[in-house]
Amino acid sequence: MMWLKQLFSRRRLYSDLSEEIREHLEEKIEDLVAGGMNRKEAAAAARREFGNVSLTEESSREVWRWPPIDDLLLDVRYALRILRKSPTFTLTVMLTLAIGIGGNTAMFTLIRAVLLKPLEYPDPDRLVSLSLKDFRQNKRDGSFTLKRLDELRASSESFNAIGAFLKLPENISFSGRSQPEALVGARVSANFLDILNVNPLLGRSFLEEEDAPGAPPVAMISASLWRRRFQGDPQVVGKTATLNATPHTIIGVLPENFAFPFVGTDIWFARPAEWSVIPPGARPHVTILNGFARLKVQVSLQQAQAELDVVNRQYEVANPGRLDAGPGVSLQVASLKDQFVANVRSTLWILFGAVGFILLIACANVAGLLVARANFRLREFAVRAALGAAGGRLVRQLLVESLMLAVAGGSIGLLLAKYALYAVRHFAALQLPRIGEIRLDGMVLGFTVAVTVATGILFGLFPSLQVSRRDLTVELRESGAGAEGGASARARILGIHARGVLVVGQISLSIVLLIGAVLLIKSFARLRSVDPGFQSSNLLTMKITLPPTRYDTGQKKSAFFANLVQRLYLVPGVRNATAAMSLPTTKGWLGTNVLVEGQPIVDGGKQPTARLQSTTPGYFRTLGIPLRRGREFTARDNSPDARPVVIINESFAQRFWPAYPLGQDPVGQHMREGIDKTDWVEIVGIVADVHEEGLTADPVPEFYVPSVVHPPQTAYLVVRTQGDPQIFVNALRSQVLAIDQDEPVSDVRTMDEVLEATLGQRRLTTVLLGSFAGVALLLAVLGMYGVVAYSVAQRTQEVGIRRALGAQQADILQLVLNQGLAVALAGVGIGVGAAFALTRLMKNLLFRVSATDPATFVTIALLFMFVALLASVVPAWRALRVDPMVALRYE
Amino acid sequence: MKTREQRDLFPGALEMMILRTLKRQALHGYALAQHIKRTSNDLLQIEEGSLYPALQRLLKEELVKAEWGVSSTNRRVRIYKLTAAGVKHLEHEVSRFEKMLEGITRVLAPGES
């Protein structure tokens, strides 16, 4: 640390030295004068004997210097001065880099938090998900029946414990304290915290016996609910809370940000299969449970998979004909983390790739600017070289300058990333798992620093190499009027060449981004143009969950909804109203076995399935689903003693009457739900298909029953209004409260919003990639313009001579345009080739668009050529206006 | 940048002479220069200025220390003094020099057969 102390005390050292030398000379002069010399001669003699004063001072000071640091400080100071002198350039470069580095920092943070970092549970590598896949039909979502999961527990030995959770979050009404509130609830097996190896913040976890039917009602709550509704009461354990109208004992509080199995869960219940939507008798047989487990320490993932394969075959043999035992059904074990992030993995990587491209393009742009600047600064370098600066020193100077630009850009970029991440965390449409784990931490900072330094070196290298390769003395000798006139012919070609390469790179990267973005935009447009099968405008929807304790019979449930719908019709401005078990476009597969009269009962997994929807009369009228044949449900169909009837959709009709719409009319035929039900039900109508499972999924066979047949515990009100649906929210809510004071209404959305939400992530990806591509295009155009304009400026004289020698305007135009187009052509060629190879990576983000969609490729290539032409036309036009005489006198 | 004297004398010679002179008595720069010139009978052509880089080197290595004071002619001068480390260093250098000189002398001695 000596040198550090010296670094700071040097100023004094230096002034001491100067004073000492001054005194020395004076003393000498006085001695000589005393010896008889006159003062003038004495001064000269003293200096002669002393030697070169400034050189002496210089070499004396040098003793104290610590060269690497000193030179660097000098370079930095010089760079600061240079950069301050051209603020526009500096600012442009800094902002360009800030966008590039900021984007990469933000995306890296996301990738790291969501995809790379292990789950934040102890020993996360051993946490696995278990799923039941069916390779014959993609319908299976991986979930288990309770029965199958119990059998798996009994037969497999690879796991410490197997847990389960209900695959969908539930709406739980929380009442009793102030106003009723709808919370997100999860149902989990009692062992879930043991498997995750997490301890509750307060109280205890579920006990094994609390998983058994009939156990006393208990619940765990989230830390945020604890603070919000219980004011962080340390005595909360043991208190009761009224959840779904049933008093539950609170047994524990989970740690802060605990987000298993769903982000934002506030309430946890045991007994995962007790889903209020499913009638109790059916629960063991419905696939509603997601499995997860902790691998035993000595068991690898492969070994576990091998064991599951055996277990699955044994199950198949023992249970022939079971739906989940058919050929093609397999048990899969995978890392729990992978399962969690499966829906966003490819999106995040693609966006990360895109910001990487943006950074490269930004680097190329900045390098282009720097090369141009280096050309303008050749005289400066030549002078410095003449004054003794070594070539290495000049290169280092340039690198210091670019690194400083990079660091400035990186700092702003970090700030940008911070705000971008803040936005991401509060943007629900992203549907990002592990959102609570997104943090700008040391690792991210390290990444940013590395990217910044790499960036600085990358774009600083071009001009440095260029300078170091040149014979700078030529510049001095040649020096003409303008600074750039000094560039030798050879160097000029070199300069264009380097920038040309940069621009080719830029164009090809932008092409890849642009093609990717256009493919996404096209997919999105195709998706938006999919007819959902109903009229979504002017529809208001809301969710109501009836507490099973107070609404314990089907009759009570269906009476509530029938009553409610009737009251809604009385609200002025309400044109139609209905209640249904699910909202179209939102739910996954909710199928059940069906049997059509006259068709044989097929073995096992081959038994046909169809989707069930339970509605009050008026559903089709309210949603605007066209009736193809027969009739809709009437109020009579929905009365308890009515003869049961069913309405099918056209996919259903085609599935069982392949000749439909010709041939035998399905209306008037009979079908039954399940195989064992004895009652045949008459088909009374056929309606058009609806995209029940989202716009990307094809319609499936579906049948509708009146809500009295399947009274839902949770139902959605759908109301068609006159004018803006939003203004009806309070009127409708008060109708609900008028029937039941304790009934919370949740998820109040217009149907357009519901549709929009299903597109949210896709829309965001499209918008992001689209804007990335826009930025890339802009940068590429600027780079291209810069190259052509620069070369035109340098060739002013040449153009003048050509004009003087009789070249036509067209010849000059061609000369300039050719250059721009050559660069563009090279860039477009490489870009299209790269896009061809890369877009297939985004296949599963596309919808009804091929990853190598020829129209897109051709359009973008042509667009780029056109843009390149435009970017060349402006400088070309300037070249045309060159007055031959001026050009000849130039320099 | 190397100074001329270092090329003419062997490296460290000037420093050694300075240390030797300062061992006898503390001096300021001018007096030091005069003393070395006088005692070498002007045989060594040394620019007075070349003293200062050498003094800075010795200061940096803490072989000498300097203090501002007033000279006999009532000038403000910087007086250099040998430190303990300087004394030791001088001894070491002198013995090294003597060995070297002995070696050189032997090589240069004529007619040894």
Image: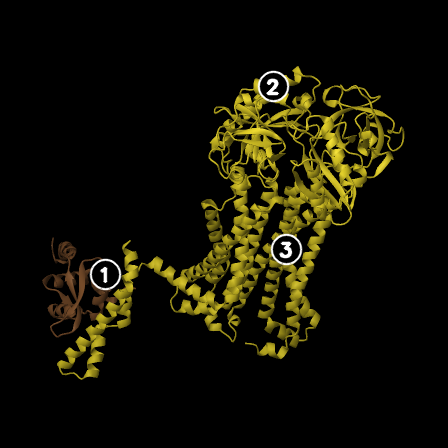
Chain colours: A yellow, B brown
Q: Nearer the viewer, residue A769 or A664?
A: A664
Name the residue tied to disc 1: B57
Q: Judge the density around disc 2: few (<14), some (14-19), many (≥20) Cα neighbours within 10 Å.
A: few
Q: From the top left corner, tell me how far across and down residue A838 is, in percent.
A: 63, 45
Residue B43 can be seen in this image: no
Name the residue tied to disc 2: A151
Q: Amino acid at mark 2?
A: Glu
Q: Are marks 3 and 1 on the same chain?
A: no
Name the residue tied to disc 3: A774
Q: Secondary structure at mark 1?
A: helix
Dot placed on the residue nearer the N-terminal end, 2 or 3: 2
What chain is tagged by disc 2?
A: A
Vertical arrangement, residue A359 with respect to residue A156, above or below = below
Q: Amino acid at mark 3?
A: Gly
Q: Secondary structure at mark 2?
A: helix
Q: From the top left corner, tell me how far across and down residue A434 is, in percent.
A: 55, 39
Q: Amino acid at mark 1?
A: Arg
Vertical arrangement, residue A247 with respect to residue A876, above or below = above
Query: Residue placed at 79% from the left, 26% from the top?
Result: A640
Q: Nearer the viewer, residue A347 or A885?
A: A347
**Cβ–Cβ below 8 Å for labels 2 and 3?**
no
Residue A469 — which label? none
Real-space Cα separation, disc 2 to disc 1, in angstroms: 86 Å
